[in-house]
Image (spheres, helix red, strand yellow):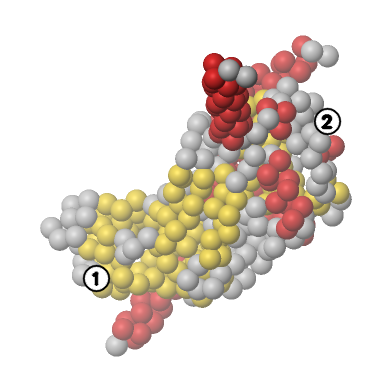
Amino acid sequence: MKSILTAGAVLFAACALPAAAETVRTGALSIEQAWARATIPSAQTGAVYLTIRNGGAQPDRIVALEAPVAGHAMPHETKQDGDVLRMAETGPLSVPAGGALEMKPGGTHIMLMDLKGGLKPGQSFPLTVTFERAGTVAVPVTVGRAGAMGPE
Amino acid sequence: MTLHHLRLILWSAVGVALVAGFVLLWRASSGGPPATQPDPARPLAEGSRWQLLDERNQPFTPADLPGRPTVMVFGFTHCPDVCPTSLSYVANLLRSLGPRGEAIRPLFLTVDPERDTPAVMADYTDLFDPRIHGVTGAPDQMAAALKSLGIFSRKVPQEDGGYTMDHSATILLLDSAGRLRSTLDIHEGEEVAARKIERLLVAEAGSR
């Protein structure tokens, strides 16, 4: 059932791709400004950044992530410890009730692993996000320049 | 020998032992004789022996550090978040410096030479700015180079069998004599980095 839902969500996102900058809503959540940086064609990894706002009275959290461009996707965080940069998997990312989860370069991001052919500027792809409460939604992600510092 | 003399000799021996002990402790705590510490007035990595490869497969050694003011970024191409952020910072900096930026040599040195070949480094750095040149090398040579430049790196295995690298965040700014002049920090506005570089260019023009 979940895979049918996911497939449906992916199909929906694929149809909606030209409107990639649009805000996507599911339940009490709205997901904005999903973007990624271009990579070299042989790249194994990439990063997606997005902002999730929760208008509801209950917190929610991301329980699964999927993207057709990558073997798998998971929440990661870059931390600076003194002068040392470390990257680590975070636990499930939560969106506080009435609050937001904002991702940006140098902090929390969704890491794409085992990329299939890299990411090209101008390309779009759906990122399927499953929330504990709000369910599954396909978020269109636009790929900007490798040197982008935000959605373009 | 009187008892008095014997006491004097024994106490002298205790004194000598104490002084020797303190000297040993001091040397251990200060990490050895001062002669091994890098001299900030000398070119960075002077006297070190390593040979790396630039993105065109040309040798890159400590003798190549002097020549032009150089910005050195450290990272690896499998790093999806902070390394592109550091290189974007340098690319934007070069853009904001305009023609003055031509005097600078921006380098990206990998901390992951096993995966980052010269060809990968060339493709990766060109994504940000074709002026940024990649440098890699054999793992033992890269390790020696990073150590002599004061850069930390460590391989961290991941659950899926792959690995990531922890590494120093520091971006080095060297003058054209190859001496460490300043460091850049991606958390500072690009105008701060631009001012550091402009100050270096002015100082170099004045000393010619």
Q: Nearer the viewer, residue B8 or B154?
A: B8
Looking at the rendered image, the quarter that the N terminus of chain A falls into is bottom left
Q: Callout 2: helix, strand or loop? A: loop
> What is the x, y in percent for residue B12?
58, 20
Question: What residue is shown at x 55% (from left), y 42% (from top)?
Answer: B169
B110 to B200, vertically: above or below: below
| Chain designation of label 2 | B
Q: Callout 1: helix, strand or loop? A: loop
> What is the x, y in percent for residue A37?
54, 56
From the image, tell me which residue sits under label 1. A132
Q: Residues within 10 Å of mark 2 (few under 14, many from 20)?
A: few
> Can residue B207 be seen at all in this image of the molecule?
yes
> What is the x, y in percent for residue B108?
69, 46
Q: Is residue A133 left or right of residue A48?
A: left
> What is the x, y in percent for residue A126?
44, 69
User: Tag 1: residue type?
Assistant: Glu
Q: Where is residue B148, by image quadrant? A: top right
**Most distant residue in the left direction:** A57
Which mark is drawn over residue B67? Answer: 2
Q: Is residue B149 left or right of residue B29?
A: right
User: Tag 2: residue type?
Assistant: Gly
Q: Nearer the viewer, residue B55 or A138?
A: B55
